[in-house]
Image (cartoon, helix red, strand yellow):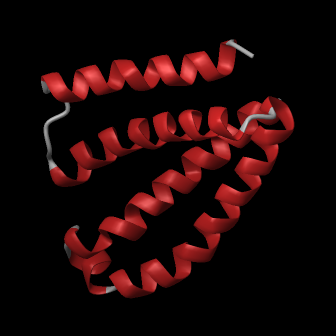
Amino acid sequence: MRILLGALLFCVAQVLAWFQSNSSILGGKLEENFLWIALVFGPIVSVLFAYGTKMLYAEIESLWSIRFLTFGIGYLVFIPLTWYFLGEQIFTLKNVISFILCVTLISTQFFLK
């Protein structure tokens, strides 16, 4: 259960980090308030990453495994957000291969111990 909760915390942190990092190019209110978004989301993202790491480490006991898992989660979060908000293509050869590699990384960390 801790591994799923830890992964969920990393998903939420990655979503917030995406907006924190990219709000300055999204237009509208987000672009107008990008500095405030960065300042408000920064501490929240840090706490989510810290608790996510703590929960995953208690279950996996390997920081390398956590790194690979969270890298894959970050990439999988990045793809739909960048497509939806910025209109960038998802189905390029590079993105499809990277997606397959991320799923492989995540699956390896979840199912092999």
Indicate the quadrant containing the C terminus: top left, top right, bottom left or bottom right.
Answer: top right
Q: Please tell me in which quadrant of the rendered image residue 3 appears.
A: top right
The answer to whether residue 91 is seen in the rendering is no
Farthest residue in the top direction? 112
Q: Would residue 28 be visible to someone looking at this image? A: yes
In the rendered image, the residue lying farthest to the right is 58
How many labels, in total?
0
**Quick check: 91 left or right of 33?**
left
Please provide percent x and percent y for residue 10: 60, 47
In the image, 21 versus 60, the foreground residue is 60
Q: Is residue 110 above or below residue 2?
A: above
* x 76%, y 39%: residue: 56
- Pick the residue in front: 59 or 79: 59
Residue at 46% across / 43% down in the picture?
A: 74
Q: Quadrant of residue 107?
A: top right
Q: For this view, does 4 lie left or right of residue 108?
A: right
- Residue 65 on image: x %, y %: 65, 32
Residue appearing at x 79%, y 40% in the figure: 57
Q: Percent position (x, y) of residue 87? A: 14, 47
